[in-house]
Image (spheres, rainbow, N blue to C red):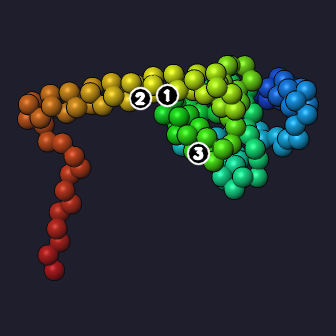
Amino acid sequence: MRVSTTDQNTENQELALKRHADSMGWDCDVYKEKESTRKTRPVKQQLMERLRKREYDAVLIWKLDRWARSLQELVMDVDDLTARNIGFIVLTQPIDTTSASGRLMLQVFGAFAEFEREIIRERTMAGLDRARRAGKKLGRPRKKRRIR
């Protein structure tokens, strides 16, 4: 479970996720993340480490946007888990990598992620070409060498 700000709470997510896990007869641990930044997600990283060690068979989340902050991050994480035969289940969306239809949905999302990355790359390259033609110097400024 994750919320965006510290004044929000995870109660709605937690109730639904626990209800689903109980209905499936699953034992589960709860991970809540309230304070994180775009680059630092300590609770998620702790969970990923435990998943990579195969301490769990699957991860159940509320919504995709609660797990990853970008489609690229999502695809990389799910590829990692799938390669380790760990299920990735999204309660409110039709994604469950333990089923054929769930894997299909994930592949569709993956195709869009790849398309998005290529579009961004094309725009970046066009911007760099335009800057070069305008005579702008690209890259970091060189450090001045000290002669002793």
The amino acid type found where label 3 is placed reads Ala
Q: CA distance from mark 1 to mark 2?
A: 6 Å
The residue mark sitting in front, 3 or 1, is 3
Q: Which quadrant would residue 82 be assigned to in this image?
A: top right
Q: Residue at x 57, y 23 (%)?
A: 104
Say which element carries label 3.
helix
Viewer-side residue, 44 vs 143 = 44
Q: Nearer the viewer, mark 2 or mark 3?
A: 3
Tell me where residue 85 appears, x and y as whole percent: 66, 44
Image coordinates of residue 137 in percent, x first then y, are 14, 42
Assign a secondary structure to mark 2.
helix
The quadrant of the image that shows the N terminus is top right
Q: Secondary structure at mark 1?
A: helix
Q: CA distance from mark 2 to mark 3?
A: 19 Å
- Residue receiving disc 2: 114
Task: Give the residue number, with chain letter if any, for mark 3.
Answer: 83
Answer left or right for 120 relative to 138: right
**Compared with residue 113, is residue 38 higher up or lower down, i.e. above or below?**
below
User: Dot 1 corresponds to which residue?
Assistant: 110
Type of amino acid under label 1? Gly
Q: Are marks 1 and 2 in contact (CB under 8 Å)?
A: yes
Give coordinates of residue 58: x percent, y percent: 74, 40
Please state, as top left, top right, bottom left or bottom right, where the C terminus lies in the image.
Answer: bottom left
